[in-house]
Image (cartoon, coloured by chain):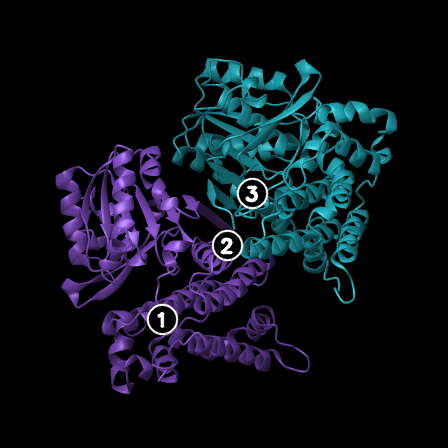
Chain colours: A purple, B cyan
Amino acid sequence: MLNFDFYSPTYFAFGRDTESRVGELTKRFGGTKALVHYGQGSVIRSGLLDKVRNSLTEAGIEFVELGGVVPNPRATLVYEGIELCRREKVDFVLGIGGGSSVDSAKAIAIGVPYEGDFWKFYCGQDQPKTALPIGSIVTLAATGTEGSNSSVISNDLMGNLKCGVNSDLIRPTFSILNPELTYTVPDYHTSCGATDILSHIIERYFTNTEEVELTDLMSEAVFTRVMSAAKEALRNPEDYEARADLLWGGTLAHNNILGVGREQDWSSHRLEHALSSEFDVAHGAGLAVIVPNFMLYTINQCPARFARFAVKMFGLSATGKSDLELGKEGIKAFRAFLDEIKMPKTLADLGISREHIPRLQKAVVPNNGDLVGYFQPLDKDDVIKIFELSL
Amino acid sequence: MLNFDFYSPTYFAFGRDTESRVGELTKRFGGTKALVHYGQGSVIRSGLLDKVRNSLTEAGIEFVELGGVVPNPRATLVYEGIELCRREKVDFVLGIGGGSSVDSAKAIAIGVPYEGDFWKFYCGQDQPKTALPIGSIVTLAATGTEGSNSSVISNDLMGNLKCGVNSDLIRPTFSILNPELTYTVPDYHTSCGATDILSHIIERYFTNTEEVELTDLMSEAVFTRVMSAAKEALRNPEDYEARADLLWGGTLAHNNILGVGREQDWSSHRLEHALSSEFDVAHGAGLAVIVPNFMLYTINQCPARFARFAVKMFGLSATGKSDLELGKEGIKAFRAFLDEIKMPKTLADLGISREHIPRLQKAVVPNNGDLVGYFQPLDKDDVIKIFELSL
């Protein structure tokens, strides 16, 4: 087990009707005037926005609103939010909706007190030193941004360049998670979300660190339950327990409790970000194509680890098989699960073909000699080969 | 799954040599003058205290010291610590050692800014509203106090009455966990610690809440690993991975990540507190006697849950058995594990006999009509019967 720091200070309020506590929680954590930041129609149609307004009003919290966040959230709206918060002297930023609204809220929260351009944090030119506190109400089980230290923004002023920032300052002060708010998520996005959650576990699971038994067992517990819960939620979108375990599983998959003590490898996410920034595909759908092929490409790095994956995640029998054979069966079983929840299999399914690969490769490794990831550091040629495997 | 709030804001620094970061972390979290609060000889003999002094000095943190914490920590020393902190204008309390030092540090941290007698928090007459920040360096895998909201103190001015307080204000601001610091723990206390950890999971696991699949799977992951790690640490006290999983498992077992979504039942702890306050036995040793008998006594409350315990924790086969039969086999297997790690089996092993039961019962349920616990609320007669089963 490697040395680690673990820090997940977010206050989570989980369960039915918890969205009505947003005013109380904003007040408890020192907010007096909030930005209510949200996406498009669904938050309004479902009545959630009205509930938020009522709760804030009851708690005596003033607020201003900024809607219009889109999937793969855009820098332009972040700039607008920063200006609005400064003008209105907002001291608390609330992101309401899917992961995009929260990621956008995080960008605003670090942008408001910063003298420079917030994008500097995303392109690695500076690190945030202070931030407004953030609250979230999440309506999709997927990104885990409600408990994570990360935010990803697409810069529409720079050809949709998709970049991320990691900082403990953007872990939400509180997050509200009501499984019932996810009942109306369309099947396709339930599946995309589950794929994103499983990928967050996989990116942490494949490691060269030898001994991480406790973290492994916990990862396997969450992974297997997220798979079964996804299938249950697709069968019955109003299955509370399935929706609850998906939602909480999504949080646990990305607040790093399942990553401690290990090296981690985020190559699949890096490769997928090229897909979603260049072609605006849903993040989970892109991962469904990339992750199994990344696994196939890197299996020789540590076949024993893939063999464990096969046994623990899918209950496959090890009898008479080499680690490599068993590991490949595990990847096949994972792919079969993705088929079952109707996730795309190939780049072609996403409307991407061989001719696009140079552009995708350039988005992942812009310069010769660049390397991505730790488990198996990938150079330009490796990245091209994984995209080719995914065709 | 029941609605829940989950809050574990502690910053954990885990791994080799992390104790040398105590100065840096105290400074990062705003401390300028610390109380270094510790136990008896081992912290000095091991050189840990010197490392702490050096680290604080290097970081420019002033400090005063107060040693002498004993197992089942006493109120008298808490009063002394409170006075010292006020006199010296201390703004950060560091608990160094086993759970007792940290629990005592917690009591001091809520006592310093309080006008009244700190004991009011422990006997339920008041709730803390503010506290000094707390840091911990833990040298024993057991109580989980490094991440928990609880502290237990024995009032030596009131016949060693043992009482606890729960408040988010006493979750440590940071905790430092170095598995190597636990290498020298004697076998008996390694076993007591493991028993305490497992009991923290059991108290949360037996529930009338029907659906808590994700929390169950995670609980089972930690429980089974803590059992195997305990055996490995007893075989080889310097097995880093075993010590690491015990230590981190102890934290996870009691920061409530394994309790969310369920009702919880803390009867076994209540019964054991009578043993340790009346007879000063080691907490884990007392639990080893009480918990299996509590389980036997309450099995009819929910046999299916005990059957799951048997299958998931001990891999027992369900074939051809009723839930009740299987559940009893599971309790037997747990008892066999406790035998293997050389934990006491009966009250007699602790020097306690039938004549003491009325006194013990009175410590648990002082008044007729009092009830303890949720899973199966226990009255006076139930408590007597569980002590009798334990003779």
- Report the quarter where the N terminus of chain A lies: bottom right
Residue at image mark 1: A188
Q: In this view, does A191 lie above or below B214?
A: below
Which residue in the structure is indicated by mark 3?
B177
In the drawing, what numbered circle is on residue A260? Answer: 2
- Disc 1 residue type? Tyr
In terms of secondary structure, where does tag 2 sit?
A: loop
Is circle 3 on the same chain as circle 1? no
Q: Is residue B178 visible?
A: yes
For mark 1, does the 10 Å Cα neighbourhood hold few (<14), some (14 to 19), or many (20 or more) residues? Answer: some
Residue B309 drawn above or below residue B349: below
Q: Are marks 3 and 1 in contact (CB under 8 Å)?
A: no
Q: Mark 1 lies on which chain?
A: A
Q: Nearer the viewer, mark 1 or mark 2?
A: 1
Indicate the position of residue B213 as horizontal and vertical percent values.
56, 57
Residue type at the position of mark 2: Val
Location of residue A186 by image quarter? bottom left
Which amino acid does the dot numbered 3 rest on?
Leu
Query: Residues under labels 3 and 1: Cα distance?
Result: 43 Å
The x, y position of residue A69, in whole percent, is 22, 57
